[in-house]
Image (cartoon, helix red, strand yellow):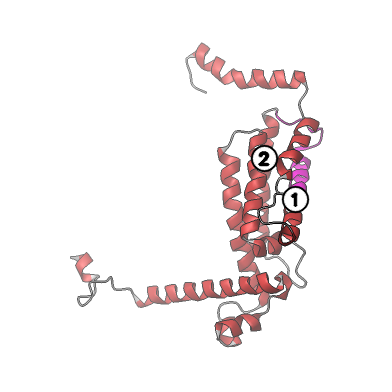
Amino acid sequence: MAQEAARDTGTGSPVTSLKERRRLYRQETIDAILATARSVMREQGVAALNLNEVARRLDVSGQALAKYFPNKAALYDELFLRGHRLFHEPEQIVLQTTAPDWGRIHQWFTVRLDLACEHPDLYSLIWGDSVPGYTHSTAVREEIGAMLAGARRGIGEVIESGAINAGVPPERVVDILMAVRHGIIAEHLAKRNLLPSGSDRFSGLIPDILAVFERAWAPTEQQSARAGENASLPAATSQEGGRSS
């Protein structure tokens, strides 16, 4: 009966409360603003984002736009947060579901590159040149910190597995890999319109560069043997003690 009461007797469609309709309208408006802002950034550059231009394209007044984003910093913040999460979530899946070896790092590189090619405006906002006058909000800084912590955990597991012996602290390993990854992506994005369609001039460098790192950071024979012994310990404990690790 409750289900029947919740439906419009004339159309058979669910009746939406006024509060819900307002919520949906607000979300649709915010999504339209963000989509328009991204169009401006793709066409004119991230730093060229202008509230008046966004309002003009949406055919609304600046005052109406201010109800949702009172200033450009608020708009940048929302774009940054949405973009960062768009990149963060797939990368975390890679770091949490793959074996702790160089294959994980390769996927960590390629996922970022693929997303950067699909969303170059957001990549530029997040990892490109700083936008004059824009300062990250607390929420943005927390999001950045969460992504960095996730990367350090994921790459740290590769180091702990014995696959990497870089001779520098784990944090430096992550910083080096992030810097190299950004360099490849920046080159690819900057020059992709000048290259033949489908060219992998820069994206194709990923396996070659990681192969160089893998050789340079290869563990010694003694370290490899120790890692193999450690990997076999849980199984041995389970067999001898009759317990699962």
Instruction: Give coordinates of residue 159: x percent, y percent.
Output: 70, 33
Kind of residue indicated by mark 2: Ile
Which residue is most to the front?
A: 196
The residue shown at (56%, 45%) is 93
Residue annotated with mark 2:
105
Kind of residue indicated by mark 1: Ile
Q: Based on the displayed image, in which of its 4 quarters is residue 217 positioned? A: top right
Which one is in front in this view, the residue at disc 2 or the one at disc 1? 1
The residue shown at (73%, 68%) is 135
User: Magenta stretch: residue 76 in it?
Assistant: no
User: Magenta stretch: residue 179 in it?
Assistant: yes
Instruction: Give coordinates of residue 44: x percent, y percent.
Output: 70, 74
Q: Nearer the viewer, residue 103 or 243?
A: 103
Q: Residues within 10 Å of mark 1 (few under 14, many from 20)?
A: some
Mark 2 and mark 1 residues within 8 Å of each other at the beta carbon? no
- What is the C-alpha distance between the residues marked 2 and 1? 14 Å
Earlier residue among tags 2 and 1 = 2
Rendered position, 187 above or below 133: above
Q: Nearer the viewer, residue 36 or 77?
A: 36
Number of numbered discs visible in the structure rendering: 2
Screen quadrant of the N terminus: bottom left
Q: What are the residue bounds of the magenta stretch? A: 163-181
The residue shown at (42%, 77%) is 22
Instruction: Give coordinates of residue 18: x percent, y percent.
Output: 36, 78
Query: Does dot 1 land on a helix, a strand or a loop?
Result: helix
Residue annotated with mark 1:
184
Instruction: Give coordinates of residue 52: x percent, y percent.
Output: 65, 84
Magenta stretch prevailing secondary structure: helix
Q: Based on the displayed image, in which of its 4 quarters is residue 177 positioned? A: top right
* Left or right: 244 in relation to 166: left
The answer to whether residue 154 is seen in the rendering is no
* Left or right: 33 in relation to 141: left
